[in-house]
């Protein structure tokens, strides 16, 4: 390995796993998984989700990591290491990540605000929706909170993903598990109907599980595990040549799945037990959970714990998803890592401002962007929702599909196997592995794309 590669390597295997798992674990696990599980038949969705993590999440984590370690460069050039014509796969991944970065930092700012509000005892009022909508409609305040989080991330990231970020994440990730489990136990003990919610979450009801629910489960695995947007390609560039990618990828997938399942354990019993409605997206945590905490004994304390846990999830993810475009800017424009980090952060904050101002009754809320759906024709979304839809339902599955095709067709099974298994040290590609790569993953990504355009209901 070259000196530069050695300098960029993670300090330990545990450090890499925590950073990689932290990159995968984010708000999608907390606010989206519980809602989808609730609407998809509870335990039925959970069972399918776990299977998809095995046949979709884990294999693509392996492939992306192998591509990154083999090339040891930014994600665009990584896909050109075998064939320069395939750099476009990395471009697709970077576009997807930048779009996610833009709206993710804005919602992350909401999390920080609510954590501080719980800490200082802010009165959310009787109408939690009015408080939330009034906040997100403000032109400046949401950007201030987002800017604070971005500044913290930039300061830490400027020292390198394998330096301070590794040390911070090794503390953040265990604390995240502890805080989430604490919130879940607290909810079970103080909410009368929480046990009913827990039963619903654990007992499968396949009568509510549709093809759309299946497609949603696939998307959730992509977003939650972090595949299709170059997370593991970027981190893989800093993975030691001696690491067992197969085993490391397994632990990353397990950690992410455990957090998603724990989030369901916290949120579904809490919401069902309180008689509240399971709503989609940010409103699940900023409306439903805030209302629930207001009625809990010690609700201020547990609310602060809950949103603190979310901040940990946010930061553990943002360290890496910001590093993805930063690495490209650094190497393509040949500038220092610190300058590339600041420049990339400024561009993303500008895009984030557009997303923020399109929310609620913001000054850009009237700006609508077209989206085509089979059977419905053109529908229109605000900037935030359009960016979310494009990145999550088209670019993510497209990134997974192209990565899979790249590994078995462009790179070839032999070349890929050599990098993945350390030239046979950690086994061989089995028939199962080949079927997953050539049939299962492509089929699942195509189902997601068909669902996105309304061909699957």
Image (cartoon, rainbow, N blue to C red):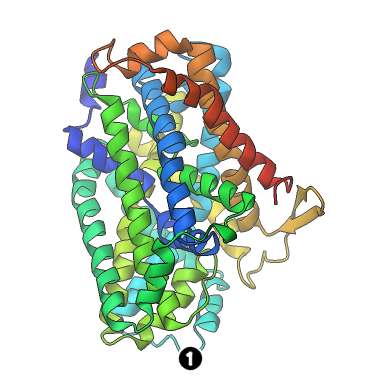
Which of these two is toward me, 313 or 213?
Answer: 213
30 to 14, vertically: above or below: below
Coordinates of residue 339 in the picture (x, y in percent): 38, 37
Quick one: which residue is furthest to the left in this view?
Answer: 12
Q: Does residue 52 appear anywhere in the picture?
A: yes
Which of the 4 image quarters holds residue 309? bottom left
Q: Is residue 439 left or right of residue 318?
A: right
Percent from the top left, x then y, of residue 76? 49, 25
- Whole-percent x, y for residue 415 in the image: 41, 10
Q: Is residue 158 visible?
A: no
The image quarter in which residue 327 lies: top left
Q: Which residue is depicted at the point 67% across and 64% down?
A: 364
Quarter of the figure with the N terminus? top left
Question: Does residue 1 appear to the left or right of 77 in the view shown?
Answer: left
- Seen at 50% across and 49% down, the residue is 220
Which residue carries the number 1 mark? 126
Secondary element type, mark 1? loop
Is residue 359 or residue 34 the one in the foreground?
Answer: 34
- Between 175 and 206, the one lying in front of the other is 206
Residue at image x 55%, y 63%? 39
């Amino acid at each position: 390995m070259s000196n530069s590669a050695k300098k960029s390597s993670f300090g330990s295997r545990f450090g890499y796993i925590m950073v990689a798992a932290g990159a995968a674990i984010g708000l999608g696990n907390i606010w989206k998984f519980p809602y989808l599980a609730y609407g998809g038949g509870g335990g039925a969705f959970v069972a399918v989700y776990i299977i998809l993590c095995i046949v979709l999440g884990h294999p693509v984590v392996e492939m992306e990591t192998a591509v990154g370690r083999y090339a040891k460069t930014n994600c665009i050039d990584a896909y050109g290491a075998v064939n320069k014509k395939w750099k476009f796969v990395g471009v697709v991944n970077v576009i997807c990540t930048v779009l996610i970065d833009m709206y993710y930092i804005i919602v992350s700012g909401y999390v920080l605000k609510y954590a501080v509000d719980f800490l200082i005892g802010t009165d959310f009022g009787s109408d939690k929706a009015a408080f939330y909508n009034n906040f997100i409609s403000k032109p400046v305040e949401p950007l201030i909170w987002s800017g604070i989080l971005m500044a913290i991330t930039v300061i830490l990231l400027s020292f390198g993903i394998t330096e301070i970020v590794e040390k911070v994440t090794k503390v953040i990730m265990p604390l995240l598990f502890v805080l989430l489990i604490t919130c879940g136990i607290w909810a079970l003990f103080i909410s009368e109907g929480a046990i009913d919610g827990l039963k619903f979450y654990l007992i499968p009801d396949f009568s509510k599980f549709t093809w759309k629910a299946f497609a949603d489960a696939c998307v959730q695995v992509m977003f939650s595990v972090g595949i299709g947007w170059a997370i593991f390609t970027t981190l893989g560039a800093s993975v030691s040549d001696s690491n067992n990618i197969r085993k490391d990828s397994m632990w990353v997938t397990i950690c992410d799945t455990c957090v998603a399942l724990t989030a369901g354990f916290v949120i579904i019993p809490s919401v069902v037990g309180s008689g509240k409605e399971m709503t989609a997206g940010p409103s699940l945590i900023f409306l439903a959970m805030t209302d629930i905490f207001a009625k809990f004994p010690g609700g201020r304390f547990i609310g602060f714990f809950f949103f603190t846990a979310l901040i940990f999830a946010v930061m553990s993810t943002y360290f890496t998803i910001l590093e993805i475009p930063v690495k490209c800017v650094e190497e393509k424009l040949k500038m220092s890592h610190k300058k590339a980090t600041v420049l990339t952060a400024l561009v993303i904050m500008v895009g984030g401002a557009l997303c923020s101002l399109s929310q609620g009754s913001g000054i850009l809320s009237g700006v609508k962007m077209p989206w085509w759906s089979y059977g419905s024709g053109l529908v229109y979304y605000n900037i935030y929702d359009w960016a979310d839809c494009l990145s999550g339902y088209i670019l993510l599955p497209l990134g997974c599909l192209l990565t899979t095709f790249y590994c078995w067709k462009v790179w070839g099974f032999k070349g890929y196997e050599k990098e993945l298994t350390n030239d046979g040290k950690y086994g061989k590609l089995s028939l199962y592995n080949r079927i997953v790569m050539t049939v299962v993953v492509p089929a699942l990504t195509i189902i997601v794309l068909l669902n996105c355009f309304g061909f699957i209901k």
